[in-house]
Image (cartoon, rainbow, N blue to C red):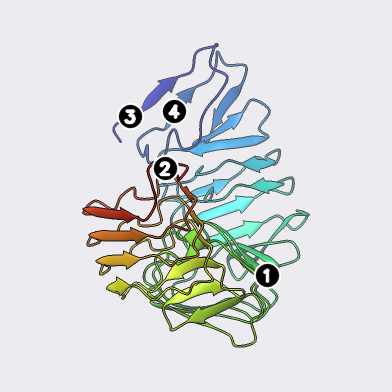
């Protein structure tokens, strides 16, 4: 955070994502010797201005060069001083979480841009079917017509509730729905949900008309065939009633169930994906039935108080 200046050598030709995140005093990057990068108005670009890699320092407004076609992942992470941002007409790709983890007072897209639109200070695809950035707080109502909500949409927002539109079909990303939203109702047209997008939500509701997902006993979000488990209520203490139809547990399905102490997985389960018990800090015991054939190597990562894993199989019979 105290870094003020960097000199780029001629040999430097690659920069990873998020390298200069939260460098709030970095106001000068010397790219005079570089054939690959240039620095202008707190923005680090590729030498032809087509890629925005990072915004540094404490600028209050950003007017991107008109040649920018791509904003890299996390480019504005931690630059909470920016209150106004202007996106140019040639912009083609905005990578997820690239617009940072805070709200803007003003977000404008050039009217000639063929890929993105701004409406009521929010960022959408040109046809308004995908929401990329929400700049609202409190009780949020997503406009009808939106079909997709992506990673990083609500970063930095002080949200108390979210009403999803009936047109919504997909929610993707990691912790997309913030922990401040205690209850989320999934409308009838949703057909694609990332298990990691809901891992901070305490309670769910699902439309009875939804043909793709079902909520069992107000505790488990399953696909309609009940073969895949996506989400578990954060209030459960013991799980021993999973339906025998479940064959796969999706990534982080049990994540952040902080009251959970014991899990008996169902007979019929075949596959356990990664970090399914992440941040289950009170989990002590997991029992796995003989039907399981594959356990991801990080399945029990971050379940720091887990003391007992019972597997009803012989050694060497499970991969992973």
User: Which residue is painted at 59% across and 37% down in the image?
Assistant: 52
**How far across and how far down the image is residue 248, in percent?**
52, 60
**Label 4 neighbour load within 10 Å: few <14, some 14-19, many 20+:** some
Q: Are marks 4 and 3 in contact (CB under 8 Å)?
A: no
146 to the left or right of 142? right
Using the image as rendered, state which of residue 72 and residue 169 is in the foreground.
169
Report, in whole angstroms, how far the alpha carbon at label 2 lies from the one at label 4.
43 Å
Q: Is residue 145 above or below residue 249?
A: below
Q: Secondary structure at mark 1?
A: loop
- Circle 2 is placed at which residue position? 297
Residue at left offset 24%, top offset 66%: 261
Is residue 8 left or right of 303 when viewed as pictured? right
The quadrant the N terminus occupies is: top left
Pointer 3: what residue?
Answer: 3
The CA distance from mark 1 to mark 4 is 41 Å
Q: For the residue labelled by badge 3, is the local secondary structure a helix, a strand or a loop? A: loop
* Label whose residue precedes the other's in the sequence (3 or 1): 3
Asked whether, in this view, residue 307 is left or right of residue 212, the answer is: left
Residue beneath disc 1? 147
Report crowding for label 1: few under 14, some 14 to 19, many 20 or more residues within 10 A (C-alpha): many
CA separation in Å, label 3 and label 1? 42 Å
Question: Is there CB contact under 8 Å for labels 2 and 4?
Answer: no
Q: Earlier in the sequence, mark 1 or mark 2?
A: 1
Q: Nearer the viewer, mark 2 or mark 4?
A: 2
What's the residue at 44%, 33% (across, down)? Answer: 19
Label whose residue precedes the other's in the sequence (3 or 2):
3
Residue marked by disc 4: 28
Q: For residue 300, say whether it is visible.
A: yes
Q: CA distance from mark 3 to mark 2?
A: 38 Å
- Between marks 4 and 3, how big is the CA–CA gap? 10 Å
């Amino acid at each position: 955070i105290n870094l003020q200046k960097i000199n780029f050598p001629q040999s430097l030709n690659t920069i990873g994502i998020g390298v200069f995140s939260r460098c709030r005093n970095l106001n000068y990057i010397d790219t005079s010797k570089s054939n690959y990068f240039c620095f202008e108005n707190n923005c680090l670009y590729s030498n032809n201005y087509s890629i925005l890699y990072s915004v540094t320092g404490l600028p209050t407004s950003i007017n991107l060069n008109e040649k920018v076609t791509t904003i890299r992942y996390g480019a504005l992470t931690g630059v909470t001083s920016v209150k106004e941002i202007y996106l140019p007409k040639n912009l083609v790709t905005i990578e997820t979480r690239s617009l940072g983890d805070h709200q803007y007072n003003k977000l404008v897209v050039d009217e000639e841009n063929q890929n993105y639109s701004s409406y009521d200070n929010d960022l959408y695809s040109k046809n308004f079917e995908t929401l990329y950035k929400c700049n609202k707080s409190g009780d949020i109502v997503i406009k009808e017509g939106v079909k997709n909500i992506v990673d990083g949409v609500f970063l930095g927002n002080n949200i108390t509730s979210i009403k999803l539109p009936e047109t919504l079909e997909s929610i993707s990303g990691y912790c997309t729905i913030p922990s401040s939203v205690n209850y989320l109702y999934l409308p009838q047209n949703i057909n694609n949900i990332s298990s990691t997008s809901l891992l901070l939500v305490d309670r769910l509701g699902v439309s009875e008309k939804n043909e793709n997902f079902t909520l069992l006993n107000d505790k488990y979000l399953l696909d309609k065939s009940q073969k895949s488990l996506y989400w578990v209520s954060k209030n459960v203490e013991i799980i021993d009633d999973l339906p025998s139809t479940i064959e796969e547990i999706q990534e982080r399905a049990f994540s952040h169930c902080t009251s959970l102490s014991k899990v008996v997985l169902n007979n019929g389960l075949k596959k356990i994906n990664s970090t399914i018990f992440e941040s289950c800090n009170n989990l002590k015991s997991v029992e796995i039935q003989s039907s399981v054939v594959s356990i991801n190597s990080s399945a029990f990562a971050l379940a720091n108080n887990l003391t007992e894993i019972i597997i009803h199989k012989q050694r060497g019979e499970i991969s992973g």
